[in-house]
Amino acid sequence: MANETVQAVKVEAKLTFYVTGADGAQLVKEHTYSHTFTDGTGTDQAGAVWNDDARSLAATTETLDLDGLVDFQGATMTDNNAVKVMWIENTSTTTGYKLTLGGGDWAGATRFLTDATDKCNVGPSGLLLAISPVDGYAITASTGDGLLEDAGANTVTSKQVFVFDNA
């Protein structure tokens, strides 16, 4: 069990775009998203945070055990039952150095990837941000908690943050 209290987690995203049409007309739009989690379990709450600022896979695959990660104090996180926020940023900048997620046992109707054959690519300088503040993406210890990460034939570095709901 992780030995921490989540003071707050705030997620903010902003997308702004400017488009000029062939006739000279302009479209300017801005979309924003903001959500805050507090300590606890349930809707809008989080019980643990895991962070790795310099994760590296060198021409290999690795399964990230979402219910067995070690927190910043060295405690094993074993009560995670759902992912509320998943931030995976591919910090590699070389064309073709993608990070492929999926193909592991963290798949099913209540998970981020719904089938064991589903995969998601995070390209170089790309970001995958998934947020589910109400239900989260379910984790089942030992049988449904492995997120498979594949660097292919390359060395891919990433920043990863997971925010969990705890039992």
Image: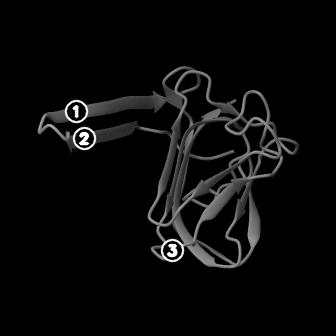
Q: Which mark is residue 29?
A: 1
Residue 14 spot, x, y in % from top left: 29, 40
Residue 79 spot, x, y in % from top left: 71, 39
Q: Residue at x 67, y 70 (%)?
A: 151
Where on the picture, by quarter, is residue 98?
bottom right
Identify the mark nearer the N-term, 1 or 2: 2
Q: Would you call the spot at circle 1 few (<14 residues within 10 Å), some (14-19), or many (20 or more)?
A: few
Q: Which mark is residue 95?
A: 3
Task: Say if residue 2 shows up in the picture.
Answer: yes
In the picture, the quarter occupied by the N terminus is top right
Residue 135 spot, x, y in % from top left: 62, 23
Under mark 1, the amino acid is: Lys
Determine whether, in the image, residue 35 is placed left or right of residue 164.
Answer: left
Under mark 2, the amino acid is: Thr
Q: Label 1 to label 3, Cα distance in Å?
A: 29 Å
Where on the picture, by quarter, is residue 121?
bottom right
The residue identified by callout 2 is 16
Label 2 SS: strand
Q: Nearer the viewer, residue 5 or 165?
A: 165
Label 1 SS: strand
Label 3 SS: loop
Determine whether, in the image, residue 146 is placed left or right of residue 151.
Answer: right
In the picture, the quarter occupied by the C terminus is top right
Where on the picture, by quarter, is residue 148?
bottom right
Q: Nearer the viewer, residue 80 or 128?
A: 128
